[in-house]
Image (cartoon, rainbow, N blue to C red):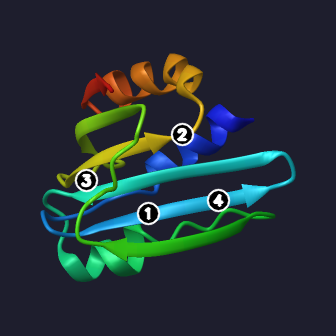
Amino acid sequence: MRAFLLLSLFALSGQAWGEACVVHSQAERLDVKVCQQNRSIPPNLFRTGFCKPQLQGQKVAVEFVEQCPTGSFGVCRNATVGGTPYQQDVHYYGVASDATYLKPFCEKQSRGVWMAR
């Protein structure tokens, strides 16, 4: 369940340098936090689309920041988003064992480079 949510958040993510959003999703026995650092997404599209995940049955909070906070267990660098030409870096926080699912998703589906922290 946690891996599915992380992958869902990743698929909905996006951003441009100096612009990031922290997405914190909570549900029963679930607490997930990711940060999307924009590389090439137009700012308006980043704010109104990529950083507005619709996760049914979950409480979602989005905070816009200049850059992603430290403390992530891994980053998917230069990730592409769902068939678009846009790129972002996605930082993952929380349970480091989730990297088992996130690394292959990052490298194969998002054509990014996984960097463990």
- Image height of 88 relative to 108, above or below: below
Which mark lies nearer to you, 1 or 2? 1
How far is mark 1 from mark 4, CA to CA? 10 Å
Q: Secondary structure at mark 4?
A: strand
How far is mark 4 from mark 3, CA to CA? 24 Å
How far is mark 3 from mark 1, CA to CA? 21 Å
Considering only order in the chain, which callout, 3 or 4, is on the residue closer to the N terminus?
Answer: 4
Which mark lies nearer to you, 4 or 3? 4
Query: Circle 4 sits on which residue?
Result: 25
Badge 1 amino acid: Val
Relative depth, front residue between 60 and 110: 60
Mark 3 burial class by Cα count in 10 Å: few <14, some 14-19, many 20+ = few
Which quadrant of the structure image shows residue 53? bottom right
Q: Secondary structure at mark 1?
A: strand
Could you tell me which residue is drawn at 42 percent across and 31 percent down? 73
The x and y percentages for residue 1 are 75, 35
Could you tell me which residue is drawn at 69 percent across and 37 percent down? 2
Badge 2 amino acid: Leu
Q: Secondary structure at mark 2?
A: helix
Query: Circle 2 sits on which residue?
Result: 7
How far is mark 1 from mark 2, CA to CA? 15 Å
Which quadrant of the structure image shows residue 80? top left
Residue 84: numbered disc: 3
Give the side of residue 16 with respect to residue 27, left or right.
left
Considering only order in the chain, which callout, 2 or 3, is on the residue closer to the N terminus?
Answer: 2
Query: Circle 1 sits on which residue?
Result: 22
Give the side of residue 18 with respect to residue 65, left or right.
left
Considering only order in the chain, which callout, 1 or 3, is on the residue closer to the N terminus?
Answer: 1
